[in-house]
Image (cartoon, grey):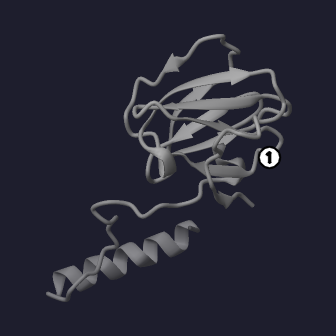
Amino acid sequence: MPSGMARKLGTTLAVAALSGGAVAVAAAPAHAAPRTPVPYYNCTYPYVCLYNQVVDTVLKYRDFTTGWQSFSRTDVYFAVNTRNDDTAYIRYTNGDTACIPSGNPRAIYDLREFGTPNGIRIDTNPNCPTNMSRPSLSKQSN
């Protein structure tokens, strides 16, 4: 905001407050509605990024592993896989496993579709197995 406009706004608010007028101030809601951050959801190659319910980044992974990496958080709801040729397997507390395909860094997947996710394994295989579940595409970044 240009400094002249800021001064005028401040003067107007001060005059309204001193004269007993009501002054409306915008406030953030008690809980934020889901939103889309900047394109690619603040997730750059070569990461698989995990997000909470309002699409704030909570965890990032990039290493290949032969075993599962357990999540340090329980508020994981969405995922983005920015890797070009590597799939990400998601483990769930109910024993299910799902696969997030590679090659679409603008896609955000709904991980809660199959339960509560609690682990990840990044694999060099470029394709998800045909018999494995895939989370639904939740939305696409600009």
Crowd rating for badge 1 (residues with CA inside 10 Å; few <14, some 14–19, many 20+): some
Identity of the residue drawn at 76% across and 40% down: 130
Residue 22 spot, x, y in % from top left: 20, 86
Identity of the residue drawn at 50% across and 51% down: 113
Q: Is 1 positioned to the left or the right of 130 in the image? A: left
Residue situated in front as seen by the camera: 79 or 9: 79
Query: Is the residue 85 above or below the residue 112 in the image?
Result: above
Residue 51 spot, x, y in % from top left: 51, 42
Q: Splitting the image into 4 quarters, where does residue 84 fall?
A: top right
Q: Is 40 positioned to the left or the right of 114 in the image? A: right
Identity of the residue drawn at 64% across and 48% down: 41
Q: Which residue is mark 1?
A: 104
Task: Quarter of the image for the N terminus: give it.
Answer: bottom right
Residue situated in front as seen by the camera: 139 or 92: 92
Q: Is 61 positioned to the left or the right of 35 in the image? A: right
Query: Is the residue 124 above or below the residue 5 in the image?
Result: above
For numbered disc 1, what is the local secondary structure?
loop
Identity of the residue drawn at 37% across and 73% down: 10
Task: Quarter of the image for the C terminus: give it.
Answer: bottom right
Residue at the extreme left of the image, as rendered: 20
Residue 128 spot, x, y in % from top left: 76, 36
Query: Is the residue 129 above or below the residue 32 in the image?
Result: above
Residue 125 spot, x, y in % from top left: 81, 25
Residue at the extreme top of the image, as rendered: 66
